[in-house]
Image: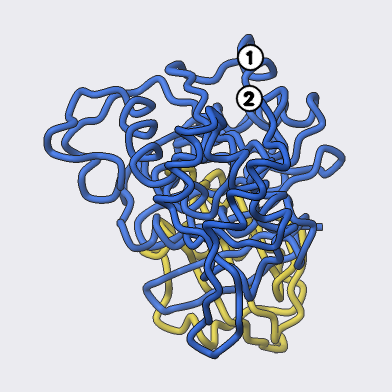
Chain colours: A yellow, B blue
Amino acid sequence: MKKQAYITLKLFATLGKFTPDSADNYPVEPGTSIRDLIAGLKIPEEKAKLIFIDGVKGELDSTLNGGERIGIFPPVGGG
Amino acid sequence: MKPDNGIKDRIRALSKKKELPDKTPYTGISVNDIIDLSGNFGISFREIEIAALEEEIIPERYVRNMKSFSATDQTTLLKSRITIVGLGGLGGVVTEILTRMGIGSLNLVDGDVFEESNLNRQYLCRENLISTPKTDAAEKRIKEINSSVTVRKHSEYINEENAEGIIGDSDTVIDCLDSLTGRFVLERASKKAGRRLVSAAVAGSYGHITTIFPEDPGLKLIYGDPENAPNKGAETSLGALSHCVSLVASLEASEAIKIILGKGSLLRNRLLVIDLNDNSFETMQLI
């Protein structure tokens, strides 16, 4: 049986609608990439422009161990 | 014409010893006295305010800045030039704040006119100004607030051809645009001209802001490569709310003032991310 880990997930702006009920304690398998996470949440990859892992910019290929705080932003350009 | 000693004597004669609410003593000069001196001596308001500040006489309009800014700081602000690109939601508030703070020269860029949908958040927009150029409304507002501020208007959109010339002699540039394409054009020109750029964007109740020095990676850290970035973002579906726009614009003004004065810490290579739905404010590391 694979080990389970949990992350905190915050989806900003237009991505808010993809927020799962368990966003504060979202289960992931250790080693899951941000790309896999986004696909699992049904977020179009091109909409996930800006990714933060524990307050530091991450990439689609960044992997999760559990315990991280993840923030995902779409492009925002209004003025 | 520069103020000579005779004018400084008149400034001293008109100045009054006063106290702040906490009893701190200061010597001030009123706006009306500065208006009279400007008329009598044929010297600009700004030159008279600077001459007063050199004598540690504080123009009353800046007295509430006094505990945060020295007379020298206020003089530095009066001698500075800031370019504001975009006079919509962000730009209108930034213009208002920098005018009141006494930034001596504002270089304003926007080719647009006001429309009714601007009324919810754009401070310069009024019911009787629909179809009026935004630069004209901004100039009028600035002149009503602070006669020491010189305005240079560019009633055109920023593009690859005009950008560098427009921002050329500014101390700092503030990105108040509403398109990603325009933001990248402005960033390229700012880097080329060696100018520091404050950039912010909003959508609904969300916003973010960063400060970019010419040698910093800048916007590509936020939006990815310019070739692949869309022209518009989440704001096309979320719009923009007045309270969020005003808050983020205030942060832009704050960054610009800190850049000019060389004080405080800046959001270089960092992004302050705001979500008013849950009152979250977090500064993220971009590198």
Which mark, by number, is residue B185?
2
Which mark, by number, is residue B184?
none
User: Against B199, is B63 above or below?
Assistant: below
Q: Mark 2, residues whose alpha carbon is within 10 Å: few (<14), some, or many (≥20)?
A: some
One can see residue A39 in this view:
no
Task: Give yes or no for contact between labels 1 and 2 (Cβ–Cβ under 8 Å).
Answer: yes
Residue B178 in which image quadrant: top left
Residue drawn 71% across the image and 76% down it? A54
User: Against B99, is B179 above or below?
Assistant: above
| Local secondary structure at mark 1 | loop
Query: Do discs 1 and 2 belong to a common subunit?
Result: yes
Q: Mark 1, residues whose alpha carbon is within 10 Å: few (<14), some, or many (≥20)?
A: few
Residue B127 in which image quadrant: top left
Near-viewer residue (A78 or B114) = B114
Q: Amino acid at mark 1?
A: Glu
Q: Earlier in the sequence, mark 1 or mark 2?
A: 1
Residue B140 in which image quadrant: top left
Q: In this rendering, would B163 be left or right of B146?
A: right
User: Against B201, is B273 above or below?
Assistant: below
Residue drawn 39% across the image and 81% down it? A21
Which quarter of the image is occupied by the N terminus of chain B?
top right
Residue occupied by mark 1: B160
Q: Position of residue A24 (x, y in %)?
A: 51, 86
Q: In this rendering, would B252 be left or right of B246?
A: right
Residue drawn 54% across the image and 82% down it? A26
User: Against B23, is B18 above or below?
Assistant: above
| Local secondary structure at mark 2 | helix
Q: What's the chain of the residue with tag 1?
A: B
One can see residue B86 in this view:
yes
Q: Amino acid at mark 2?
A: Val
Q: What's the chain of the residue with tag 2?
A: B
Q: How many marks?
A: 2
